[in-house]
Amino acid sequence: MHMNVERLKVNYKTLEEFKKFKEYGVQELSMLEDLQENIIEDNCDSPFYGIYYGDKLVARMSLYERSAKYDLYFDPPQNYLELWKLEVLPDYQFKGYGKRLVEFAKGFGVPIKTNSRMKSKEFWEKMDFHTVPYDMERDLGQNPLVWHPNEVKDKKPNS
Amino acid sequence: MHMNVERLKVNYKTLEEFKKFKEYGVQELSMLEDLQENIIEDNCDSPFYGIYYGDKLVARMSLYERSAKYDLYFDPPQNYLELWKLEVLPDYQFKGYGKRLVEFAKGFGVPIKTNSRMKSKEFWEKMDFHTVPYDMERDLGQNPLVWHPNEVKDKKPNS
């Protein structure tokens, strides 16, 4: 099946589609407000990437590039991607949409860090992500999982 | 009703009780491992506080003191508490356990920051928490909510 990953534009249509996703939150509300108040223009790039089935958005994720300066996960410290709000609408699950999005993110060739719900751990392991040792000051309520190209290592605790 | 908030000890009994909570994650697994490998002693203090009904743990939360140096939420920057994994077991909800825990946290007299699921926003607003303007670099997939004593202000975006 054709699964084109697109960078999503901020516009009223996209924001309406976002309401169907469970992890709709302050981030989306803030984008809506910025659009309404003309702080951002219609159709400017968002941090979201998604897959359409016909004209319906059925899967999405958010990506943000963190600079090496703030890297607390990898050794040596380096630019990496934070991935969040990976979600596939219920009727479209188990068809490879999530995998396609994760592969797209890996295509940038830099390490990726995400935060998993315990129930999704199996999915992330299939995607070759692994858990890192928990560090309370850094991770608090998160369950961090990372993936990295071969030459990169996990940061050692307290190093 | 008697609702004593206790700081929870790390021991096998507590960790077994934690399994009943939905937000069981890497943090709890890490505590279990540290106990098994004698990295921490039995009965040492954990970052969790909870309420028992008889000998059953029915509500819990985790608290961590962030130093002013890392404060990105308040003005002026100051020590504050990060609160996460606030959860009441299903049969004990809507009886005031969550409120009791939040009031306990407020008793430390410093600002509090938490991350809400959208569904719990109403609860947090009843607790006098409010949302802060979303800042992607800081908040990513979070929906931050804060409470602070009167003299403290929210940090302005990009200040």
Image: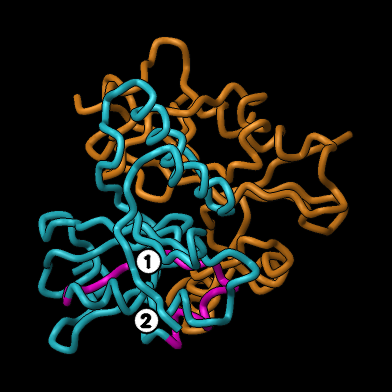
Chain colours: A cyan, B orange
- Look at the picture and state if A28 lies above or below A57: above
Q: Are marks 1 and 2 on the same chain?
A: yes
Instruction: Please tell me the numbered disc located at residue A129.
Output: 2
The correct choice, above or below, for A133 with respect to A22 in the image is below
Chain letter of mark 1 equals: A
Judge the density around disc 1: few (<14), some (14-19), many (≥20) Cα neighbours within 10 Å.
many
Three-letter code for the amino acid on which mark 2 is drawn: Phe
Q: Which mark is residue A89?
A: none
* Span of residues in magenta: A109-126
User: What is the quadrant of the N terminus of chain A in the image?
Assistant: bottom left
Residue B154 in percent (x, y) is at 36, 21
The residue tagged with tag 1: helix, strand or loop? strand
Q: Is residue A111 magenta?
A: yes
Asked if the residues shown at circle 1 and circle 2 are in contact, with their CB atoms under 8 angstroms apart, the answer is yes
Of callouts 1 and 2, which one flags the residue occurring earlier in the amino acid sequence?
Answer: 1
The residue under the point 13% across, 57% down is A67
Q: Residue at x 87, y 52 (%)?
A: B91
Can you tell which mark lies on residue A114?
1
Give whichever of B109, A63 is nearer the camera: A63
Left/right of residue B75 with respect to residue A29 in the rendered view: left
Count numbered badges in the picture. Answer: 2
Question: For this rendering, which residue is in front, B36 or A107?
Answer: A107
The quadrant in which residue A65 appears is: bottom left
Q: What secondary structure is marked by label 2? A: loop
Foreground residue among B22 and B99: B22
Left or right of A146, for residue A86 = right
Disc 2 is attached to a residue of which chain? Answer: A
Neighbourhood count class around disc 2 (C-alpha, 10 Å): few under 14, some 14–19, many 20 upward? some
* Position of residue B12 measured from the top left corner of the image (x, y, whole percent): 66, 74
Residue A45 drawn in magenta: no
The three-letter code of the residue at mark 1 reads Thr
